[in-house]
Image (cartoon, grey):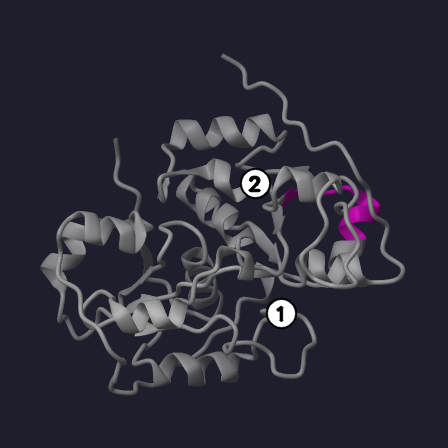
Amino acid sequence: MEANPHLITAKELADRLGSPDLPIVDASWHLPAQGRDAKAEFAAAHVPGAVFFDHDAVVDPGSTLPHALPSPEGFAAAAGALGVAETDKIVVYDGLGLFSAPRAWWLFRTFGARRVRLLDGGFPAWRAAGLPTESGSAHPLPKTFHPTFDADAVVTLAEMRQHVETGDVAVADARSAERFEGSAPEPRAGVRSGHIPGARSLPFTVLGREGRLKTPAELRAEFERAGIDPAAPVVTSCGSGITAAVINFALASLGNTEARLYDGSWTEWGSAADTPVETGGARQVAAKP
């Protein structure tokens, strides 16, 4: 099977530690319900030479939405301070394996970095391989990140409204089936339950196994069950734009690098007063044998 060009194994990374153009980014982030502190975990142990990417800090400071896309200048400043340039061979990982790292992967690519890969299996795979770790804070040498913003990678609320009206593109929702259906309450106050009309339920958890991306054949089967053609135009969404990127990463791994991400996601759509909401309908169809 051909290797996924968007992944790097723990062994491959270990063999290249210390390369000046290979910044390693710990992009761990956790939901409050998970009861984990990503910053504290980074301080306790991380891949040698890694820096910590704070998803709650690298945002648009003027937005009330969580994880709102920063400006190109804001992202460039944050990336440069972490010692990352857009020309580097960037490796991103998280503490669960396949959760928040794809969001950082997507952000770096959206702002102009093209050589970005995920550590296959994330930090759990690194530790399982018995590879060395280090503790404490990171002290990277700053670099200059020259941003080139890919506006086509991002879907705005206005564009999402148009997509709903025309039904011209598949919308993949990465939240749990229960949240999609509206049978489970939203974790954020003031956000209605349900989903964007016409959206398909594709929980990000079905795209991986033990922190690793499933095989191409398995991924295609999951998209088929959700009623989504992985080769066609797709807009991804989730709660606040984090796990939607897992779907983008899976699509890129299948050769579809044109998928877009609705950055406001359900927090924006579900809290607006005039957006239509549907409930129910999360059940997937059986894949063809």
Question: What number is the disc on residue 234?
Answer: none
Question: What number is the disc on residue 66?
Answer: 1
Q: Is residue 215 visible?
A: yes
Residue kind at label 2, given as amino acid type: Pro
Please identify the quarter of the rendering in which residue 85 is found: bottom left
Helix, strand or loop at label 1? It is loop
Instruction: Quickly name the residue at label 2.
Output: 203
From the viewer's perspective, is residue 235 above or below residue 20?
above
Which span of residues is magenta-colored?
162-172
Residue farthest to the top, as pictured: 289
| Residue 182 vs residue 156, the one in the foreground | 182
Q: CA distance from mark 2 to mark 1?
A: 20 Å
Residue 53, image x and y in percent? 40, 72
Residue 3, image x and y in percent? 26, 40
Residue kind at label 1, given as amino acid type: Pro
Mark 2 neighbour density, 10 Å: few (under 14) some (14–19) many (20 or more):
many
Residue at left 38%, top 52%?
96
Please identify the quarter of the rendering in which residue 119 is found: bottom left
Looking at the image, tell me whether mark 2 or mark 1 is earlier in sequence order.
1
Q: Is residue 36 left or right of residue 8?
A: right
| Residue 111 vs residue 50, the one in the foreground | 50
